[in-house]
Amino acid sequence: MSTFSIFLVLITIVCFLLIIVVMVQNPKGGGLSSTLGGSTQMGGVQKTTDFLDKSTWTLAAILIILILLSSLSFTGTMSDSDSKIIDEKEKTMPKTETKSPVKTTEKPVK
């Protein structure tokens, strides 16, 4: 497994975690915090909101770092030059020779 593939798996995991964290949040202050009610059980509502906010920013930063690192580790070995479609197209198409234009040495008629 190449380094690029490892980065792709990590990016996918971070994306799904980020989706889950964002979906749990409610833009109007509800979300997971509202399910706990108005009481301050289990660390309080404000701490839950702070945790979700910090985890969102942390996952976003990790995602950006992973994307940058994956672009640095990309070697380009899976480029279009190794494509089977391009190879098949070259086999089926006859090669045509390009002729260079012939220079004429005639004198222009006045």
Image (spheres, rainbow, N blue to C red):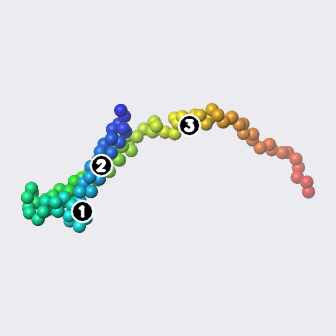
Residue 26 on image: x %, y %: 24, 62
Q: Where's the N terminus, which quadrant?
A: top left
Residue 27 on image: x %, y %: 25, 64
Residue 26 is labelled as 1
Residue annotated with mark 2: 16
Crowd around label 2: few <14 · some 14–19 · many ≥20 (10 Å): few
Q: Residue at x 36, y 38 (%)?
A: 5
Q: Residue at x 9, y 57 (%)?
A: 43
Image quadrant where residue 47 sits: bottom left
Residue 7 on image: x %, y %: 33, 41
Residue 85 is labelled as 3
> For the residue labelled by badge 1, is the local secondary structure a helix, a strand or a loop?
loop
Q: Earlier in the sequence, mark 1 or mark 3?
A: 1
- What amino acid is found at the position of numbered circle 2 in the picture? Phe
Q: On screen, 87 above or below 26?
A: above
- Front-most of 77 and 72? 77
- What amino acid is found at the position of numbered circle 1 in the picture? Asn
Q: Earlier in the sequence, mark 2 or mark 1?
A: 2
Q: On screen, 46 above or below 77?
A: below
